[in-house]
Image (tube, rainbow, N blue to C red):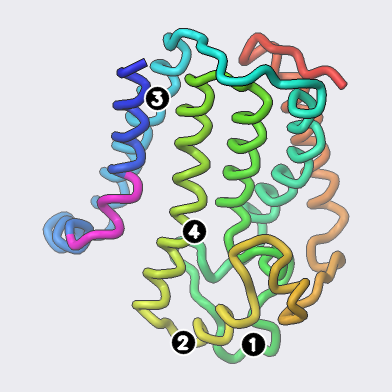
Amino acid sequence: MSNLVIAALFLIGTHLGIPSTQLRAQLTAKLGEGLYRLLHSLIALVAIVWLVRAWQAAPVRMLWTPGPGLRHLPLLVMPLACLLLVCALSQRNPTALGQAPDPDSAEPARGIVRVTRHPMMWAVALWAIVHVLANGDLASLVFFGTFAVLALAGSVAIDARRTEERPPGWGVFLQRTSNLPFRAILERRNKLVPSEIGLPRLVAALALYVALIWLHPRLFGVAVTP
């Protein structure tokens, strides 16, 4: 279990600690932006592989016994996580790497960004949280909890970094959107426009969801049953 905890701390520390400190600026100045990103990606890959293997080798120590409601929670939540992921990969987002708000746009947020300005982060967070609840053991709490912390803390860190950089149009974009899904819509700072997401993305998200259910027992040895 100690190996799992160390791996989790290493992933969190390297993923959040480096970009949010002056060390990133120092490394970028010495290595260049491209080489820094490559190095950071390699470190993240090593950390994730270490974490996965440590989780697989960790003993099972139950913290709670998930009932039918918790065991089936991923079936209810993962369709939304899949849609967030598909949209994050296929739609423009001013919070994504290499992108920025359009200060001249009449609609600073479109598509899934109306729901949350961090769809990728929330896709990971939802996946991680429901799997913590559905498993109920200490190793899964550390493993999936690590990804939840990375996603949620990462979304806050991105907002803080962009606010400090203050690119043109960021203030308006920040005001019209929310980190927490649907908050800006509920507060009437934005509105849901399903047509901007589109039927093809909905179909792709559904296909991903079905593929995950089919692959789950083959990849993880646990069948997903309704």
Q: Name the residue carrying label 3.
A: 51
Disc 4 from disc 1: Cα separation: 23 Å
Q: Nearer the viewer, residue 103 or 52?
A: 52
Nearest-to-viewer mark from 1 and 3: 3
Mark toward the start of the polypeptide (4 vs 1): 1
Picture quarter with the N terminus: top left
Q: What stretch is highlighted in magenta?
A: 15-22
At label 4, which amino acid type do we have? Ser
- Determine the image quadrant of residue 183: bottom right
Q: Name the residue carrying label 4.
A: 155
Q: Check if mark 1's residue and mark 2's residue have beta carbons within 8 Å.
A: no
Disc 1 from disc 3: Cα separation: 42 Å
- Give SS at disc 3: helix
Q: Which residue is located at x 49 percent, y 58 percent?
A: 155
Mark toward the start of the polypeptide (4 vs 3): 3
Mark toward the start of the polypeptide (4 vs 2): 4
Magenta stretch containing residue 226, yes or no?
Answer: no
Tally of marks: 4
- Give SS at disc 2: loop
Residue 168: numbered disc:
2
At label 2, which amino acid type do we have? Pro
Mark toward the start of the polypeptide (1 vs 2): 1
At label 1, which amino acid type do we have? Ser
Q: Check if mark 4's residue and mark 1's residue have beta carbons within 8 Å.
A: no
Residue 88: numbered disc:
none
Q: Check if mark 2's residue and mark 3's residue have beta carbons within 8 Å.
A: no
